[in-house]
Image (cartoon, rainbow, N blue to C red):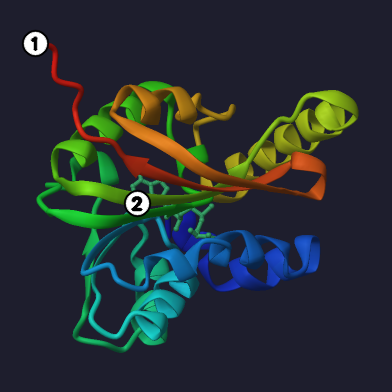
């Protein structure tokens, strides 16, 4: 077994044991804004808890669920037993993004990528998304103020743990907000939790600016 395959079955329990229900609340924060979506791209959903909630709340939605861990995708398929969910076991950077997607979701996934990869991926996604497509994100965050150093230390510890357990090579949070902004997305809402160490955000693809 390699990568996240090694931690797949324990992942949910380890999460509840360390953070309780807070990560789940982040994932579901903006779910109600996505009920009209038709075609979703869910990257790195792991064991499929977000995808299960998504197909449960959007009766018409069809989902492309991309994850490079076969074990994670096996759990996702068991949880989301629906012909509306198409699984793709591939590195997200090599996934042929087609769309047109009106919903993109990445929960605790962008932190597995470098800034340069998030930049490339965001541009590809923007090119294959419908106008005003929504992108729901939850992730770890380094806030300013009193929680800055606790956040840095916790995130450093988590990267070390995932390096040992899942062989994750990335060791720092990418500058994903800048990458999404440069790809044409705009932040519509941001909900911090745990003093800003966790963040749930909703971004929308803006129409291209026409210069006369
Ligand atoms: C930290 S887990 C997050 C899982 C889930 N989204 C959640 O909210 O808990 C990261 C997931 O992204 C997947 N992943 C990491 N890097 C990837 C990549 N480059 N391409 C596709 N999947 C990737 C892992 O296999 C894992 O399932």
Marking on residue 91:
none
Question: What residue do we see at 90% from left, 28% from top?
Answer: 146
Q: Residue 29 placed where, x, y %?
A: 58, 62
Residue 46 % position (x, y): 45, 63
> Which residue: 55% across, 67% down?
28
Q: Give the residue furthest to the front.
A: 212
Q: Point out the residue furthest to the right here.
A: 146
Q: Position of residue 141 (x, y in %)?
A: 66, 36
Residue 198 vs residue 14, the one in the foreground: 198
Bin the neighbour count of mark 1 within 10 Å (Cα to Cα): few under 14, some 14-19, many 20 and up.
few
**Which residue is outermost to the bottom?**
81
Left/right placement of residue 18 relative to residue 43 reads right
Element carrying mark 1: loop
Sequence order check, earlier mark of 2 and 1? 2
Instruction: Please name which of the two marks, 2 or 1, marks the residue nearer to the observer.
Output: 1
User: Residue 190, located in which quarter of the rendered image?
Assistant: top right
Which quarter of the figure has residue 77?
Answer: bottom left
* Residue 15 sits above or below residue 182 on the image: below
Q: Residue furthest top?
A: 212
The tag on residue 212 is 1
Gap between marks 2 and 1, in whole Å?
Answer: 28 Å
Please, what secondary structure does the residue beneath circle 2 have?
strand
From the top left corner, tell me how far across and down residue 183 is, in percent: 29, 27
Mark 2 C-beta closer than 8 Å to ligand 1: no
Left or right relative to 202: residue 61: left
Q: Which residue is mark 2?
A: 134
- Residue at 19 percent across and 46 percent down: it is 131
Looking at the image, which residue is at 25% across and 39% down? 93
Mark 2 closeness class: few <14, some 14–19, many ≥20 residues within 10 Å: many
């Amino acid at each position: 077994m390699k990568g996240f395959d090694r931690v797949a079955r324990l992942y949910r329990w380890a999460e509840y044991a360390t953070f309780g229900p807070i990560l789940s609340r982040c994932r579901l924060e903006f779910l109600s804004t996505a009920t009209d979506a038709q075609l979703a791209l869910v990257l790195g959903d792991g064991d499929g808890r977000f995808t299960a909630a998504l197909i449960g709340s959007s009766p018409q939605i069809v989902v492309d669920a991309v994850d490079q861990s076969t074990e994670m995708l096996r759990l996702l398929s068991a949880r989301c037993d629906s012909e509306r969910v198409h699984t793709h076991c591939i590195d997200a950077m090599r996934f042929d993004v087609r769309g047109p997607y009106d919903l993109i979701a990445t929960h605790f996934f962008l932190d597995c990528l470098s800034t340069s990869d998030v930049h490339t991926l965001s541009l590809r996604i923007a090119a294959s998304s419908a106008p005003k497509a929504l992108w729901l994100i939850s992730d770890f965050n380094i806030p300013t103020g009193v929680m800055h150093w606790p956040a840095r230390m916790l995130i450093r510890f988590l990267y070390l743990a995932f390096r040992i357990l899942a062989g994750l090579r990335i060791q720092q949070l990418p500058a994903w907000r800048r990458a999404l902004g440069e790809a044409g997305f705009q932040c519509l809402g941001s909900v911090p939790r745990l003093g800003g160490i966790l963040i749930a955000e909703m971004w929308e693809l803006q129409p291209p600016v026409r210069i006369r």
